[in-house]
Image (spheres, helix red, strand yellow):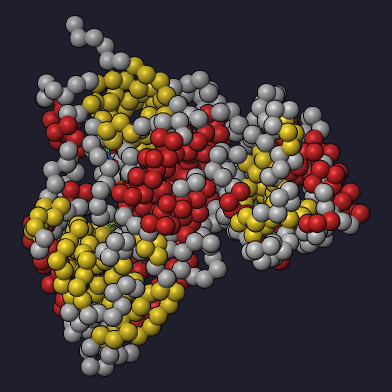
Amino acid sequence: MAPAPPDSRVDVLIVGAGPAGLMAATWMSRCGLKTRIVDKRNTKVFAGQADGLQCRTLEILDSFDFGHRAWREANHMLEICLWNPDENGQIRRSDRIPDTIPGISRFQQVVLHQGRIERFFLDSLKEHGGIQVERGVMPEALELEDADPHDREAYPVKVTLRHLTEEQATPATINGTAKNGTVQSGLFRSNLTPDDTEDLLNAAKGNPRAGLTEIVRAKYLIGCDGAHSWVRRQLGFVMEGEQTDYIWGVLDIIPITDFPDIRMRCAIHSADAGSVMVIPRENKLVRLYIQLTRTEKGGGQHDRSKITPDMILKSAQKIMAPYKIDYEYCDWWTAYQIGQRVGSSFSKNERIFLAGDAVHTHSPKAGQGMNISMQDTYNLGWKIANVVKGVADPAILKTYQSERRRIAQDLIAFDHRFSRLFSGRPAKDVMDEEGISMQEFKEAFEKGNMFASGIAVDYGTSLIVAKPGDAASEGDGSDVSAANSKKPQVVGKQSLSSVIKLGMRMPSFQVLSQADARPWQFQELLKSNGRWRLVVFAGDVKQATQKARVQALGEALAKPDSFLHRYTPADAPIDSVIEVLTIHCSPRREVELLDDFHEIFHPFRKEVGWDYWKVFVDDDSYHEGHGQAYKNYDVDPVRGCMVVLRPDQYVSWIGELDDMADLERFFDGFMLARR
Ligand code: FAD
């Protein structure tokens, strides 16, 4: 009899090591969860595919300490040029607008191919605990047992994994002949190519070299297995929406051209030869997105064998005429049909989750897919980690679907509008009702830039976002009032700042360390390590009444039965679950860290002494000017306020320094006592 397959247990199993899966694995490594991540392919992406990195994504990568790698290596896109036909039908530059809305982030949109982003994740995983992507491994069976959501020892997800041979794990690539010879295309990943998952499984079963199967039992499973998601199909969830009738080609080339704006992002609408989007990339590369053809709506898939690099180039040449464009080197190319769809559900029993392309697909031109996919698991990862570690009640897991499904729906609505405007023929004049108004296109572009940046994300009321309103209506099925049973709902005081907005990510302004005068962007202090944060805007601590309020707050937080202590295991540092960060606005030189602030604001440990990097000041720096943090955050410089930030830097609650009871009730709604 064949031996039973080996059986292992993990906190989290991740299927798929694209951007969404790697982001999930990164959270798990930073939070110390036992995790496996498998991918059916034997390599990561090397060329082509996604390339746009939005501001919010860069903030997130920076919070994991590798944003600088992307920022340095990428091409920075600062301006968009709009090219439209003039009265004689010849294309002309009609407008220039900033690519990223000025002032919304300390980063601007950049472009770098997906393979490099995946490389940064893989390096970071190696550096922090060594979770390794297991390649050539895919699931072939999935079972989910009923389990009490509060049972932290339960492993209700059972997955049979099959190990593939090298041959099976290597995708059959579809090449195309470009001027520099045979160039690999991305068609094997494109939606114009049928999914090969079943073929791979069947081939592996029938092949004696296809080694092992094994059983993995997991507390949680995250399906990040792309648009054809096997995990999604096992759960019986469907993608809702439709395939559009536009076929697009993508060409990554080093262009040889007299087109003057080739190093700018350009949206070019020709009079009647179609549209092209120009994306200047790293290493002299330029990506061209070109609408190739229209199929009959609902007419099924297009014959991809007809699409070649040459055909894509010829279309670009027609659209960009009288300017000339050609190339000697092509890096990658692909073609796709836009499908605008959202998954019917993002989670099964809050034990199995779906993220990324597995639950939303749309056109790639607005540079969203990779970003929103990573942001999905950025939203989910810390929640699972908090639950596995016993920090928070499993009820918080419901907010994954309520927060992220709405973003996916917004994305599809945005993409729908944007694609229609981009793909359509420009109107000849105001009477031309079938044509697209170029003014409308420009306005949509400008508005769309805010959405596309990722900064506009605004999560609704829930256990972990103390906004007015009712969580149930946000669609997560969890009910704040039910979770707090007989207690009234806690609502933060939004009136204390018009800039620090409940449900949105904490903006960043410069502050100085009180202890050593070093300037920091405040976001740099909000590392992704799974900790919650209480930000105390201490106000003007040189004023006696304010000093007394801050002292009273310190004493309340330091009490052995305060929430800070109750939620922190007795043997762990006091900042390991909720970190208290303070920003005051008295003159730095007139304040003494150790004398003027209660110890809880700069905790002491006998092995390492005082923590000097918890108290900051809004003051002039020697070399970087004044951050004007109080003014920019719109916080009263005398009375200050308190802000609770989630581990993903979204604002949960805001209140006065004396609102300890409310603050405590807010945390009591979902945090678990540890002592
Ligand atoms: P994927 O990247 O598809 O990763 C899924 C992973 O799961 C893969 O590694 C796959 O091998 C693995 N897998 C699949 N099935 C299984 C299985 N059964 N078992 C084990 N492993 C499995 N997005 C942007 O943000 N900006 C852009 O500019 C952009 N441009 C694009 C251009 C093109 C031409 C294309 C095709 C896409 C573009 N995208 C862009 C979209 C972007 O590539 C995707 O949205 C993004 O890769 C989604 O990440 P993901 O991790 O969800 O899925």
Residue 634 appearing in the image: no
Q: Quadrant of residue 610 in the image?
A: top right
The image position of residue 348, as x and y in percent, is 41, 35
The image position of residue 492, as x and y in percent, is 70, 52
Residue 528 appearing in the image: yes
Would you place residue 362 above or below residue 376 in this image? Answer: below
Report the residue at 36% width, 52% height from top.
370
* In the displayed structure image, the side of residue 235 where residue 472 appears, left or right: right
The image position of residue 646, as x and y in percent, is 60, 45
* In the displayed structure image, the side of residue 270 where residue 648 appears, left or right: right
In the foreground, 331 or 592: 592
Kindly give the residue lying farthest to the front in the view shown: 622
Kindly give the residue lying farthest to the right in the view shown: 544
Q: Quadrant of residue 463 in the image?
A: top right
* In the displayed structure image, the side of residue 618 where residue 86 appears, left or right: left
Report the residue at 37% width, 19% height from top.
8
Q: Quadrant of the C terminus?
A: top right
Kindly give the residue lying farthest to the top in the view shown: 1
Q: Quadrant of the N terminus?
A: top left
Would you place residue 670 above or below residue 542 in this image? Answer: above
Numbered disc total: 0
Report the residue at 31% width, 67% height from top.
280
Would you place residue 105 above or below residue 406 in this image? Answer: below
The image position of residue 562, as x and y in percent, is 77, 34
In the foreground, 565 or 191: 565
Would you place residue 118 above or below residue 153 in this image? Answer: below
Report the residue at 47% width, 59% height from top.
55
